[in-house]
Image (cartoon, rainbow, N blue to C red):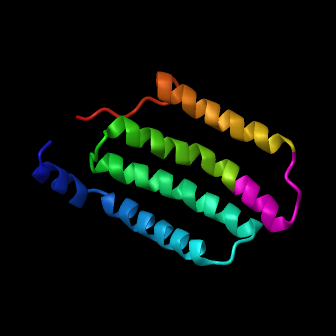
């Protein structure tokens, strides 16, 4: 697809939603980088990083950026599948509760599912360009 096709696909549809969300998440992330760190701030930054991966991968996939749709799809799905874990850990930290031992199991399962999907595309197949 040429440059005109990319620009046309970015200006039509819902690409602006990914752009606005990505800019907001990046602004929040940069703001919290400058903040005084504690456990809650660090975990919230993990939540923001997951959202940046999800929306950034979605945007880059829609824009057909290098290195390709499959790569950005995998980044987007990684952010999407790690986000529930990050929200869980953030919720526990916000409530002042101690994280259970099973939190490591959930992280390992999410990473293993992503690794399996990257290698085989068995869970979710990447989109195909039409």
Residue 59 shown left or right of residue 124 in the figure: left
Residue 10 shown left or right of residue 76 in the figure: left
Residue 88 included in the magenta stretch of the image? yes
Residue occupying image coordinates x 37% and y 35%:
70
Residue occupying image coordinates x 48% and y 21%:
120
- Percent position of residue 76, x then y: 47, 46
Residue 112: quadrant of the picture:
top right
**Nearest to the observer: residue 14 or residue 111:** 111
Residue 25 shown left or right of residue 87 in the figure: left
Q: Which residues are magenta?
A: 87-100
Residue 74 shown left or right of residue 47 in the figure: left
- Percent position of residue 86, x then y: 67, 53
Give the answer, above or below, for where 36 lies relative to 125.
below
Residue 128 included in the magenta stretch of the image? no
For the image, the number of numbered tags is: 0
- Percent position of residue 115, x then y: 56, 30
- Percent position of residue 87, x then y: 69, 56
Residue occupying image coordinates x 46% and y 38%:
74
Give the answer, above or below, for where 117 lies relative to 57.
above
Give the answer, above or below, for where 95 lies relative to 74.
below
Q: Quadrant of the N terminus?
A: top left
**Nearest to the observer: residue 71 or residue 35:** 35
Residue 12: tell me if it is visible.
Answer: no
Residue 67: quadrant of the picture:
top left
Residue occupying image coordinates x 49% and y 52%:
53
């Amino acid at each position: 697809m040429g440059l005109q096709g990319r620009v046309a696909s970015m200006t039509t549809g819902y690409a602006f939603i990914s752009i606005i969300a990505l800019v907001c998440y990046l602004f929040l992330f940069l703001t919290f980088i400058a903040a005084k760190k504690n456990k809650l701030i660090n975990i919230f930054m993990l939540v923001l990083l997951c959202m940046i991966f999800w929306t950034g991968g979605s945007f880059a996939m829609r824009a057909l950026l290098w290195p390709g749709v499959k790569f950005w799809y995998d980044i987007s799905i990684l952010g999407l599948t790690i986000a529930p874990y990050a929200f869980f850990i953030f919720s526990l930290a916000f409530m002042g509760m101690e994280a259970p031992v099973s939190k490591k199991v959930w992280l390992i399962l999410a990473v293993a599912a992503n690794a399996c999907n990257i290698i085989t595309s068995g869970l979710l197949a990447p989109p195909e360009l039409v």
